[in-house]
Amino acid sequence: MSSSGVAEDLKRGLEGLLVQVREDARGGITVEVLPDRLVEAAERLRNLGFDHVKSVTGIDLPSEKRVAVVYHLSSYTNPAYVKVIVALRTAVERSNPQLPSLSKVWLSSHYLERETFDLVGVVFQGHPDLGRILLPDDYEGPPPLRKDVVLKTEGIDA
Amino acid sequence: MTLEVVEKHLELLIGPQHPGSGHMRLVAKLDGDIIVGFDPDVGFVHRAVEKIAETKGYVQIIPLVERPPLVDCVNVNLGYVLALEKLLGVEPPPQASYLRVLAAELNRVASHLYGIAIHAIMIGSSTMFMWPLADREVLLELLQDLSGARVTYSYVIPGGVRRGLPEGFKEKALKAFRYLRRRLRDYDDLFLSNPVTVNRLRGVGVIEMRDAVNLGIVGPNLRASGVPYDVRRAEPYCVYSDLDFEVMTRREGDAYSRLLVRIGEIEQSMKIVEQCLDKNPSGPILHESFLRGLSPKARAYMEQTGRVRFPALFSALKPPQGEVSVRVEAGRGELFFYVVSDGSPTPYRLRMVTPSFRNLAAFRHVMVGNRLADIPAIYGSLDYFPPEADR
Amino acid sequence: MTGRAETFLSNAARWVSAKQPIKSIIDWGITFSLWPVHFTTACCGAEFAATSAPRYDAERFGVLPFVSSRQTNLLVIEGTLTKKMAKAAKIVYEQMPEPRFVVAMGACAIDGGVFWNSYNIVRPHEILPIDAFIPGCPPRPEALIQAVMMLQAKIRKGIAAFE
Amino acid sequence: MMDSIEGFVNVILGLLFTPQIFVPLVYPGLLTAAVMAIVIIWLERKVAAKVQLRYGPLYVTKRMGGVTQLVADLIKFFFAEVIVPRDVDKLPFKLGPALLLTFSLLPVVALPVSGQFEAFRSDATLFLAVALLSVGPIYVIIVGWASNNKFALIGGLREGYLLVCYELPVFISALAMAVLYGSLDLVELVRMQGPGLWGALLNPFAAVSFLVATFMSTSRFPFEIAEAESEIVMGPYTEYSGICYGLCMAYSYIKLYVKSILFALVFLGGWLPTVWPFTLDPTLPGLIVAFKAAAVMLVGVFLRAVYPRYRIDQALQIGWRPLFALSTASLVWSLFMVGVKVGGWV
């Protein structure tokens, strides 16, 4: 199945959820959804046949005062979707990053969400075990993948 | 005297200084000899690759991303460069693609041999620790001929590869494979059909197909549970669509079948490399858009030695704005790169989801209900490499 | 009373073991019995495993990777030391009986290497007394063996970093 | 002056060569056991290295193939700091290794390694040796408990489980041999094996079950379970450092040494392939026993290069089912042999 066919599928499957399905020039499919519709969209996507999460990415966007969270979904079992990766994208407020957890929809997002909480600071409500995973327990300061954590770089005045 | 029983279960902290833990801590709750709770405590090797990548130029990231999965670095390198090329819109010349596959498969064999060695020492077979590590040296020698380095090759660069095929490589590789095939039979005699091994591994740490899909585990672990998912087949990159190989799958989903899948994949990888050597087309090994930036002297050097002089263009590679996601099949499973570019010389966000991190989900699920002595057996069978998971 | 006897005995033992030729014999024994503790701190551990494996065979020099910190006398910092691992490394070092030696393996263990500007690493020389640094990313097994040989020479000369 | 020195030396030599002193201290006791353990551990490492395409210990004395490696290790352990952690049970923790070693070595007083130079004469030496051999493991459990470490505790418990399951086959197969030869006296037992009828040939079941149980009791692969390193670090000895650990490490080898001698006496014809009736000189028969014991030990340590290790429950199943059945079968076989009077000498 071509990727545009998948996009049609998604549009049909997610009807009435105020989502935006777009396809970029490089063939990536992105489903944009508002945070309060995230769980519902996820459930519908799972029912369509997307059975696992490949990645959960938090992207800090200080210019927009938001943190984007991207779930990359695909399927092991549904042959139509094995070939595609769909990005389920939402965004939360940077100052109060709260998002419902999708670990009940996809078990595979458990550790990925925990990592996003740890490194980007997005709080996933309803996550069964949200805690530090990669950073030491006594880590202090803003989540390291936020843009306000600036690393030293090599330079003339370093 | 009064006795007070506080806790029924024994909580055992295994690691990080423990011969059976690697670079992590395993927290096991035991009821007698049976595991009733299990929690891997990772993060001991978290070195912030994703954050450091935001401070480095696109080409400088290549050595950075290949450090965490040290024993499997060509595949990681390849995954990153594919993502970068997708951003740039560059398609490497055919010979470069074949060489990439060749290096990646050689490295996959080395990685599997390393995994088998660690698995064997976890259940106590010191000889089977030594043999695969000895035979891994053969592959490292081949890769060293190809790229000039022992374990961290940085072989794949945007638009091509760093070096062409050296003289006499084909004969050397075929000889190495004859040797390896003979050794695989030795492994079978000593280890795979050893009654103790079979008793220790068969039926231990079973992951059912449904659970494997739900947990989202990847690589040989997934295929051992009966899911025929291999990125090389699902979404072929480089030249995998032209090559003939089998996706090794098994039904049982236990530790033993994971071991056998790995052994089978070694065979398949050798088959792929042989095909690459046969089909290897001649031609340039770097995309011409990069060749344009080279001085005539550097070009002459390249023609003469088959080694690429880095064009100055590399130092300030500025991909257009956008985001790409790329997956490749690394030694331990599917590797996922998600690169967001804002048009500057450094990536805005680089997401790298390594196979080991995805396999981490299997631990909690698979350990409970087994015995204490099964922890290393299962841990080894998952071929989990903590630096790769923690990045 | 027993306490005093024990102090006396341990003082006597210290006195004896500082005398020639006993000291030379002890140094010879330690030289060829450097057992590194099984403590992998980062990815150089893969090369450390290769060093014990057939091609490089560190056991030729009496280097036998061993299981627990109590029975070993060599701590090899195999690559990057993260903050979380540094606490463990410190504990492992303190658990080891004297005389004990530390080898820092790899560029990361010297000054951070590729990860020099990471927010989560520690430079090992800031927390442990290190006898030998091995450059390389990762160092080849030969380099690790050379470090062991240098450490052996240092012990024979009595100039290793332990007190 | 010379006379007095000579006299003094003579007295010392005379004392040393009294069986009651010579046997526990020199041969087959402490000194031989130590040398044997050193050589066997070295051989173990060399043989394993050979199988694994390596050299093994070499540069410590390059010309002799690194045979002094274990001496270097011993020196290192001897002069290393002995750490007594704060939370251990101090007295058993400190005494444990010494007692372990003592009780693993004690059975040699009951072993007549040359048939005539004995510490004491008894007609139940087989019984005594086997009984004394089963005391040592109890200290392993004590040591594991005293260490106050979870891994040590689990290791001690594992040893406790295994103790019952390996001692029983040893007892029963020893009993089978006693029934077969009609004596509990080891000297008598060896003499009965005279006309080439080694115990291992007359009752192979007993030999196999005794040997397997021996390897099980001395933590040889595939039964290296009480100190399985990738599971429970070093088992009961996890907290030991310095010479205390050295003693613990020697324990299993010395136990293997003693059991190998016992095996050589009961199943491999003891000192027999000498001139019959043997000469007054006890050296040669003694050497023969040592040689046979070394061969058995080598088999034991060679298994390391071949097998992974079993899980504790699997080992217990092997101990209680096939091994126990085999030893019982050996007893029945002995009774049958006695019944039909094989060899005509019963």
Image (tube, coloured by chain):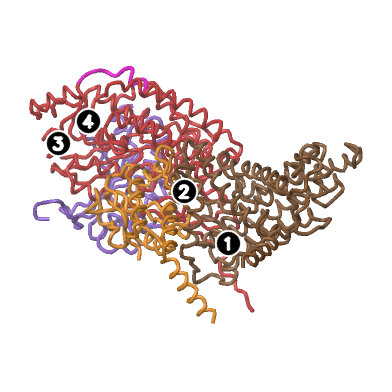
Task: Give the quarter of the image for residue A132.
Answer: bottom left
Q: Is there a contact, CB below 8 Å, between mark 3 and mark 2?
A: no
Contact (Cβ within 8 Å) of mark 4 with mark 3:
no
The correct choice, above or below, for A114 with respect to B254 in the image is below
Mark 2 or mark 4, earlier in chain: 4
Query: Label 1 belongs to which residue?
Result: D153
Asked if residue C135 lies in the magenta stretch, the reply is no
Across and down, in percent, residue D170 comes to 74, 50
Write down the chain letter for disc 1. D
Give the Cα distance between marks 3 and 2: 41 Å
Q: Do labels 2 and 1 share a chain?
A: no
Chain coloured red in the rendered structure: B
Labels 2 & 4 near each other (Cβ < 8 A): no
Type of amino acid at the residue the image marks with label 4: Arg
* Quadrant of the rendered image containing residue D342: top right
SS assignment at label 3: helix
Q: Is the magenta stretch mostly helix, strand or loop?
A: helix
Residue C151 vertical placement versus D43 (above, below) = below
What separation in Å lies between label 2 and label 4 (alpha carbons)? 38 Å
Label 2 CA crowd tier, 10 Å (few <14, some 14–19, many 20+) = many
Q: Mark 2 points at which residue?
A: B363
Residue behind mark 3: B314
Q: In the rendering, what colour is chain D?
A: brown
Q: Kindly identify the amino acid type of the residue bearing the numbered disc 1.
A: Leu
Can see residue D169?
A: no
| Callout 2: chain | B
